[in-house]
Amino acid sequence: MDNRRDALVGAAKIVLEIQRLGKASETGMATVSLFKTSPQNFGNIPDTVDFSFSMQHTEQAALQKMESDIYAFVKKTAEEDNPELKVMEKIWNFDPACKRLVSLTGHDSVYTRVVCPTAMVFTPCKDGISHNPAEYANPKECSDGAQTILGAVLKYDDILRKKHST
């Protein structure tokens, strides 16, 4: 029975590596937020595991290193454990010209993350004031934020369309 391909074992190794990278990053974080195996029953070994993860860091170079490390680890795990790697795609690409804010807050993403990949877009407000009646974001900043969200939705829609059309 050593020739069985258990997708959950490979995925578990990757999850632990994501956690390790997050902890080792000092001022960053990495976490798996969505995880689904199939089939889900007691009598079968999972042949499919879908999961999403998020990585954040205060330094762009450190984040890029974390990302390249996890991609290399995933490929290495696929080679060693022989699972079939179907899709590994970065959903979010941030423009380096954008100011990156690091936030460990959840807001509504605490709930939406259980049904779809989730991130938050922060729009700069005048004098840094938010969650207050004096909060103001100029129309250009609001437009940029809306375009960012639209781009993410369209990208994810394309991923889902490709995934379900085969």
Image (spheres, rainbow, N blue to C red):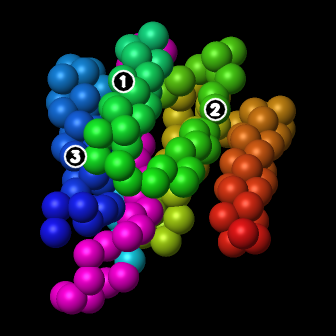
* Residue closest to the eye, 3 or 107: 3
103 vs 153, left or right, is: left
157 vs 103, left or right, is: right
Precedes in sequence: disc 2 or disc 1: 1
**Can residue 132 be seen in the rendering of this structure?**
no
* Residue closest to the eye, 1 or 155: 1
Q: CA distance from mark 1 to mark 3?
A: 14 Å
Q: Is residue 78 above or below residue 56?
A: below
Residue 52 screen position, x and y as percent: 43, 53
Residue occupying image coordinates x 41% and y 35% = 75
Residue occupying image coordinates x 53% and y 65% = 116
Residue 123 screen position, x and y as percent: 64, 37
Q: CA distance from mark 2 to mark 1?
A: 17 Å
Q: Quadrant of the image for the C terminus?
A: bottom right
Residue placed under numbered mark 1 in the picture: 69
Residue 80 screen position, x and y as percent: 29, 39
Residue 66 screen position, x and y as percent: 37, 23
User: Callout 1, which amino acid?
Assistant: Asp
Q: Is residue 159 magenta?
A: no
Find residue 161 and name its label: none
Residue placed under numbered mark 2 in the picture: 93
Q: Is residue 38 above or below residue 151?
A: below
Residue placed under numbered mark 3 in the picture: 13
Precedes in sequence: disc 1 or disc 3: 3
Q: Is residue 52 magenta?
A: yes
Q: Residues within 10 Å of mark 1 (few under 14, many from 20)?
A: some
Q: Secondary structure at mark 3?
A: helix
Span shown in magenta: 39-60
